[in-house]
Image: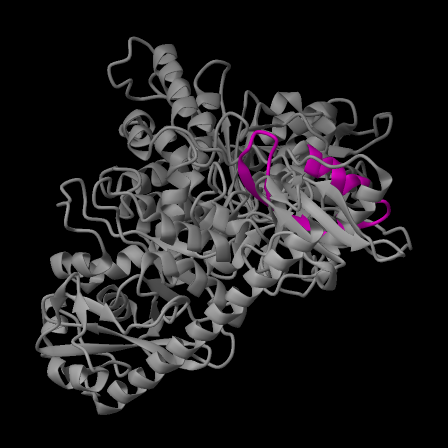
Amino acid sequence: TPEQVAERQRQNAERAAQEETEIARERADTAKKAAAIWKAATEAKADNPYLSRKHVSPAPTLREIDAGAAAAILGYAPKSSGDALAGRLLVVPVKQCDGISTLELIDGDKHKAALAGRGSKVGGYWATERLPDGDGTEPLQFAEGVATALSGKEANGNMTIATLSAGNMLAVAKAMRERYPTRPFAFLADLVKATGAPDPHAVEAARAVGGKLAIPDFGTDREPDMTDMNDLAKLRGADAVGRAIASAAAPAMPESQPEAESLPAGEAAGAGIPDAKERPCFRVLDEWIEHGGAKYRPGVWHFGTDKDGSPTQSWACSPLHLDAVTYDGQDNNFGRLLRFKTTAGKWRQWAMPMDLLAGDGAMLRGELLGMGVEIDPGQKARNLLATYLQARPPKRRMHCATQVGWCGDSFVLPDAVTGPNASGVIFQSGERGHDEHTRAGTLAGWKAEISARAVGNPLLLLALSASFAGPLLGKCNGESGGIHFVGDSSTGKTTAIEAACATWGGPGYRRSWRATANGMEGAAALFNDCLLALDEISECDPREVGAIVYALGNGRGKQRASRSGSARGVTRWRCFVLSSGERSIATAMLEGGQRAKAGQSVRLLDIPAARAFGAWDELHGAASAAAFSDALKVAATRHHGLAGRAFLDKLTQDGRDFCATLEQVKALPMFSAEGGEGQDKRAAARFALVGMAGELATEYGVTGWPEGAAMDAAVLAFGLWRANRGKGNDEGRQILDRVAAFIERHGDSRFSDADANGEAHVRERAGWWRDSIGERTYLFTADAMREALKGFDFNRGLDALQVAGALPAPGANGERARALRVCGRPVKLYQINPDKLDGGKHGA
């Protein structure tokens, strides 16, 4: 009956209150005994039996006491697994928010015992030093045991917290995240003895608070007892522990979420369905819950009350957690880091821009539905979802990057962030589809099937080296630009591009030239600080080629107006471009009736792809060049997206001054542009960067190439570019070509003999010619000279003609035009020697 139910509830509440009172009394008694032992204990010495056995030095937050003295204070001998602790005990204070709650005592035989008292250790921790008062940027490390924490501290000097048990790690991590919302966290995972996999408690704690997971690497011959960072330090030294922590990465999302994470950050685990005094509120249920005779499906629920106080509940969507507030370095682009379960039952993360909530939020719902979130289609539920996403901003803060590439000292990809502060950075995008940076296969497979085949093939070496150059642009203050492979169809140009793409991603990575200048802006922004691969320039409208080349090299999009008429933000990027086609940049532009300017030709450097076997020199046992290309294409689909990440793992930890390193490479004799001008030096700098990138990838152990192979390929390519282009400034050669072409077209029709007795009738006269000892000089009128130099600055054109020797030096009055007698009358004319034009054209 209702009366009996009420009586049972009263009795249960009374027993619960009595139990809570008893637990509180026991905890207070335990804390009192802990304080007495801590006061009697002395500073821990380096020769403490436990510390000596673990080969670690004491921290100032540790003490020691004789087992007999501790037993006298406690009134009992502390025991572990039935064995009484003996000798000098290490005293580890277990701290909670209100001070020391208990102690962990450890003897020289690794026996451990905590003081009696229910629950006094749950949520407690020990730290190698006093915790800082405020948030900061210095990493905070977590370990399970004291010795592991001390080994982590000794490896890199970072403060380390011991959670004193694996099951306690999640609770401590969440408490510390509440205290330090933005500080980077790293979890020093123990290995499961039987499998060698990282302890699931550490994985879950790192995942719950956005931390990185550091895993000890013992190699393939790990002994079963080697499980933690302290074992690694004893085996290989503190440097090995430091490298393992430096290589820490964010753990992957699980296939399913454990029960401990059934409620969002800030809610107490197990809170379940709220009572009347807690309403209105939102709760997230990850599993089915039965309460009060009703079943509640997994998802985001809003619990409220009617006007008469009756409880109400509404389901908004499938499980969706708010893990952090995101914003960029300029305090803009705010968002929410969401964690949700898809229809397929898998968990995933997405940094959602808050501007998707503008209007009726249809764009946001569309993105969530596309990613697998189930949403109640009713209007009320739609409003509830928008309210939930804004009602309680999480305390945790993260920086967001809206483009791939560098964000401080970390490198951002759509699905991962690499770097010392990676746990505090997330990629944020309003779109769900980012299929460029996918992964497949193994790094060893990439080395064996792609990288190894580049040895002996300088163009393939060049392409793969160039694929590593993008991240170095930011390190070297470099400009965007790249290389354009030119050659006949089916020679292997596209295969080289596909092999380079495999450094970063799969089949979806390569882009086509078939785009407008506006469309190419968006493509370049997708590959900021990375490789932009463009295939087959013939597919591009020739009228668009010039604008695209300039935009790619300048790294900035077109200035556009906003709806209010003010200037919108300009899209920016910085990437290394690899391109291919049967035509050079200049030839492609000519088809559109445009002349290639020097600035365009130096932004994408034409490299002829004509080697012994198409684009290849060494077939590595393949029956033909086509078979070799096919093998590379197959390998690129099987093994991709791993080499670039391995390169970033090392690069983000490398503190060298790469600007200085590049200057040293550019100063090498093989990159000296002897007799060259500024454009030659710019090209030499680009090839030097490519060579340096390849050598750096080799040094990091990514490529497996011999030392110097990448640099040799870059030097060879520089030579091919210069041989294909000719010496001197590109614009100067174009000027000479233009004047020579003018003479070739109009020499017989618009010029006549200057020494003729009578002046010949010439339509649209451009000037005269004069023969002297077998040489002919063309005498241009001022208008004809300007016509011949159309498209160039006039004085710049005259300078180029003079430098080539085609135009005499200025006279005493500084004028280039000379007063000459023609057909019996004086005329100011420009004297052009056509033989000098031809010599300049061919690089003499």
User: Outermost residue, top direction?
Assistant: 623
Q: Residue at x 74, y 50 (%)?
A: 302
Q: Residue at x 60, y 48 (%)?
A: 403
Q: Residue at x 73, y 37 (%)?
A: 375
Can residue 778 be spotted in the picture?
Answer: no
Q: Nearer the viewer, residue 827 or 588?
A: 588
Left or right of 166, for residue 110 = left
Q: What colour-coding does the image apply? A: one colour
Quadrant of the image occupied by residue 749: top right
Residue 195 in picture, x, y percent from top left: 24, 39
Quadrant of the image occupied by residue 432: top right
Q: Nearer the viewer, residue 382 or 794?
A: 382
Tally of marks: 0
| Relative to 118, residue 36 above or below | below
Left or right of 154, for residue 137 = right
Q: Residue at x 69, y 48 (%)?
A: 1
Residue range corresponding to the magenta coloring: 340-369
| Relative to 218, residue 540 above or below | above
Magenta highlight on residue 364: yes
Residue 402 in picture, x, y percent from top left: 63, 51
Quadrant of the image occupied by residue 309: bottom right
Left or right of 741, for residue 764 = right
Magenta highlight on residue 644: no
Residue 769 in picture, x, y percent from top left: 70, 32
Can residue 189 be spotted in the picture?
Answer: yes
| Relative to 749, residue 395 above or below | below
Residue 442 in picture, x, y percent from top left: 33, 31
